[in-house]
Image (cartoon, grey):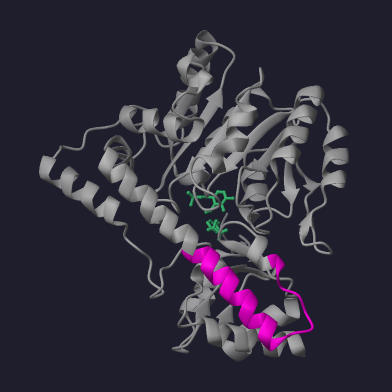
């Protein structure tokens, strides 16, 4: 049965990394994948993480199976960080949180759960969105459609169109929303816009599924969770997938979670029992190491503060590189305004480069962007900025 098996297409983003790795140019720059690198261009190991690992190592704990839903200490910390210490839904016992294999794993558990118990719904994602959203929900069996989001003319959100489209969504539609740091555009919703979406969600009986992959990369851990907090005030089911890949620089440990907001403690118990069934039939139970690092950091007030400081430094460095990029481009191409790049949030920028320009950047300069024109600002540093600006100037000028 494998004789005529077709070759699968590459992931559009991870495929860029493969091409980058095969390039022998010593001055190559990977602005494709969403990974934070420091001013030396290296993937950081956070000090808070290293200190937590030291603590864990001295304990020399044996590695039994974790409960199906994950490490209890970790689950409690996720709930506090995402929903806030004084969250009513937390205090009322209405949250069900399960540890997941990164944010992707949280989305997939949510998708499978919804497919089992809400099978007729459509899933609506933003246009554009993270490439894996569509693939993941389709793989779970859903029909995936999109709602308008980014407007290349204004470099902003086409909010009127977004709201009008959501108002026409069939009841029960699952709406995937980027909680902050929209991937790929870097353009976020403001508080008034979140409130308006919330009103439509209630009126139309939609099911919000928030993807929180970049908590702490826009304004800080508390402010970046405001969209989650808004939705948690509603008397409707809400799903939240969150990830620590970026915020703890723990990409390879696969640490994330899925949380469902339920109507009551009793409903939460039923939901948890079914989510455990989804997990059991997929991978039985999650791995220990990443979750114990995150729990150890968040439980300890000193380590917690150190982590917040390190996350703040990542956030500020990205902002600094945005401003540096804008001012260099202003000098190089004075007749074009790139000010919008400094307004965007998180790791990414929709640069406005077209496919031909992206290809030329790659072929002539060994600078790798995603075909959509998305560039990762978190991969810029003071050593590669000049080269990147020179190359951008040449491809934009032609
Ligand atoms: N959701 C979005 C919007 C992302 O950009 C990412 C990035 O990787 C993820 C989810 C998945 O995160 P993880 O690597 O933790 O699976
Ligand atoms: O958008 C990005 O670059 C990150 C990393 O299948 C990523 O979210 C990209 C593609 C993918 C998984 C992770």
Q: Splitting the image into four quadrants, where does ligand 2 fall?
A: bottom right
- Whole-percent x and y of residue 101? 43, 43
Residue 394 visible within the image: yes
Near-viewer residue (304 or 140): 304
Q: Is residue 100 left or right of residue 342?
A: left
The N terminus is located in which quarter?
bottom right
Q: How many marks?
A: 0
Task: Please indicate, yes or no, whether residue 250 appears anywhere in the rendered image.
Answer: no
Percent across and percent down for residue 21 are 46, 77
Q: Position of residue 375 (x, y in %)?
A: 61, 69
Quarter of the C terminus within the rendering: bottom right
Q: Which residues are magenta?
A: 317-340
Please state which of residues 275 and 398 is positioned toward the viewer in this rendering.
398
Q: Using residue 20 as the reference point, say whether residue 396 is left or right of it.
A: right
Residue, x 47% and y 65% (percent of image)?
317
Q: Which SS does the magenta portion mostly show? A: helix
Q: Position of residue 153 (x, y in %)?
A: 84, 64
| Occupied quadrant, residue 143 | top right
């Amino acid at each position: 049965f494998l004789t005529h098996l077709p070759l699968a297409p590459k992931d559009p983003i991870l495929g860029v990394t493969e091409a980058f790795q095969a390039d022998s140019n010593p001055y190559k720059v990977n602005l494709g994948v969403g990974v934070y690198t420091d001013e030396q261009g290296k993937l950081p190991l956070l000090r808070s993480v290293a200190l937590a690992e030291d603590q864990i190592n001295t304990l020399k704990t044996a590695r039994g199976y974790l409960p199906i839903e994950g490490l209890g200490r970790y689950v409690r910390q996720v709930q506090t960080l995402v929903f806030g210490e004084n969250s009513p839904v937390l205090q009322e016992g209405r949250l069900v949180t399960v540890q997941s294999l990164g944010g992707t794993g949280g989305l997939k558990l949510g998708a499978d759960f919804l497919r089992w118990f809400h099978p007729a719904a459509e899933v609506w994602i933003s246009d554009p969105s993270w490439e894996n959203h569509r693939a993941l929900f389709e793989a779970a069996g859903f029909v995936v459609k999109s709602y308008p989001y980014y407007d290349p003319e204004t470099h902003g959100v086409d909010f009127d169109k977004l709201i009008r489209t959501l108002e026409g969504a069939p009841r029960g539609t699952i709406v995937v929303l980027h909680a902050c740091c929209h991937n790929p555009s870097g353009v976020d919703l403001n508080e008034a816009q979140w409130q308006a979406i919330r009103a439509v969600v209630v009126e139309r009986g939609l099911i919000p599924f928030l993807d929180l992959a970049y908590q702490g990369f826009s304004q800080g851990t508390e402010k970046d969770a405001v969209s989650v907090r808004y939705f948690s005030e509603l008397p409707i089911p809400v799903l939240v997938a969150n990830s620590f890949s970026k915020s703890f620089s723990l990409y390879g440990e696969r640490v994330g979670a899925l949380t469902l907001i339920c109507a009551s403690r009793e409903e939460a118990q039923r939901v948890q029992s079914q989510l455990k069934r989804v997990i059991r039939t997929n991978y039985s139970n999650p791995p220990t190491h990443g979750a114990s690092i995150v729990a150890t950091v968040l439980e300890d007030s000193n380590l917690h503060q150190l982590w917040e400081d390190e996350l703040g430094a990542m956030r500020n460095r990205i902002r600094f590189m945005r401003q540096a990029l804008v001012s260099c481009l202003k000098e190089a191409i004075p007749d074009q305004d790139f000010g919008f790049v400094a307004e965007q949030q998180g790791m990414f920028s929709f640069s406005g480069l077209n496919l031909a320009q992206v290809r030329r950047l790659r072929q002539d300069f060994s600078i790798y962007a995603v075909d959509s024109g998305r560039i990762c600002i978190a991969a810029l540093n003071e050593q590669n900025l000049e080269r990147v600006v020179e190359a951008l100037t040449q491809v934009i000028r032609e």
